Each structure stands twice: as C-alpha cells, then as structure tokens.
Image (spheres, rainbow, N blue to C red):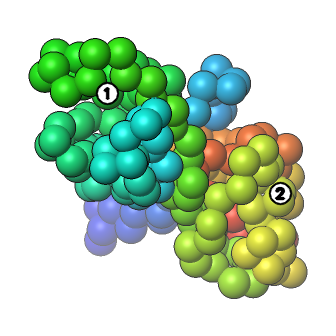
Amino acid sequence: MQRRYFVSLSGVLLSGCAVLAADGSRLPKLPIGPTGTYRLGAGDGLKIRVYDQPQLSGEFIVDDSGMIDMPLLGLVPAATDTTSELADAITALLKAKNLILTPSVAIEVSKYRPFYALGEVNNPGQYPYRPGMTVLTAISIAGGFTYRAEQGYVGVTRDFGRGPAQYRAPITALAEPGDVITVFERRF
C-alpha cells in the first residue's frame, strides 16, 4: 500500500511539472534575429518583374515545397532566400539558358504568409501579417487578451532553419510571418 502512495505522489509531482512548463515560464528566450533580412517562405506572394519581358513577369506564390513555377524556367527554389537573392538566382537562370542576354529582375513581396494566434486571445486564428508588427500588435489583431491571459510574455513558435521551436518572448518582440503566437493563462 505504501508503494502505491509513492507512485501516485510521483505522478502528482510530474503533473505539477507539466503545469509549470505549460505556462511558458521554462521556455528558452526568443533569439534576436537579423533585422531587415526577410526570408521567403511557403505561402508568400511575389510580384516578379523581368524588364521588357511581360511573359516572364507576374504574380507567383511560393508553394509548400519552397518553389515558384516560372514560365520558361520551371521550378525555381525560393524558400529561405531574400528577394534580392531570388532576383540574382532568376537572373543567373535566364543567362544560363540563353533566354535573355542582360536580364534585369525586380521582386517584391505582394502578400506575406499569415501568423497565428492561439490561447488566451479573444479571437484565436490565422491573420494576415503586416511588416513591422510586434507581438502586442498581433494580439490586438486577434481581439486582445482574455481576462485570464498572462500579459507579460508569450510563446512564439518560429523556425530558424533547424525546424520550428517554441520560445518565450516579451510582448514588445517583433512578430514574423508564419509565427504561432501562444498567449498563456496566468496563474491566479
């Protein structure tokens, strides 16, 4: 009988540890990434202009595999590139295939991939990203905090190239497209 009591006490201790981790207090801090270097990802909409070549210009979406499908070039890798790196890659492909002798390519992001708000927000869901938004702005877009919300920090799930991981972030941190922002329940 004494052994059974010990097992259930350890189960209680383990469940208590899970509660501590569920509030986000033990998450690693969100690393500060380089500013101004937006990396493309699946779901981004791109406006690509090849000077004096309307048949090669247009709107393209980065697909789930990280590629865009361009006329005459086929599938071009785009994920993890900046817009200038992708423009250089397209320029190199056009030259390599002898399609244009001196191509000039300009790319802009026409639609950013969305961010997601979960947990103690009034309207959890998917929302369009706006450049320069903070986590607090993202929470405001999702209807603001509920009355049970922890308002000092949040969990941010982000991929830094090694697969997605969840981090603890202040509400003043910059949000990025594709982020999953989790607002935790505060402890009473």
Which numbered disc flags the more N-terminal residue, 1 or 2?
A: 1
At horizontal 33% and vertical 61% (from top left) the residue drawn is: 7
- The residue singled out by tag 2 in the image is 136
As helix, strand or loop, the secondary structure at mark 2 comes to helix
Residue at screen point 62% across, 71% down? 127
Q: Residue furthest front?
A: 52
Residue density around tag 1, few if under 14, some if 14–19, many if 20 or more, within 10 Å: many
**In this rendering, position of residue 90 left or right of residue 69:** right
**In this orientation, does residue 26 appear?**
no
Quadrant holding the C terminus = bottom right
For disc 1, the marked residue is 90
Q: Amino acid at mark 1?
A: Ile
**19, 101: nearer the viewer:** 101
Residue 112 or residue 136, whichever sits in front: 112
**4 and 98: which one is in front?**
98
Is 28 drawn above or below residue 61 in the view shown?
above
Please indicate whether residue 114 sits to the left or right of residue 43 in the image: right
Amino acid type, callout 2: Leu
Where is residue 1 drawn, in percent x and y? 29, 71
Q: Is residue 8 left or right of residue 136?
A: left
Residue 79: image x %, image y %? 35, 37
Is 124 situated above or below 187? below
Residue occupying the point 33% across, 36% down:
78
Q: CA distance from mark 1 to mark 2?
A: 37 Å
Q: Which numbered mark, 1 or 2, is in the foreground of this view? A: 1
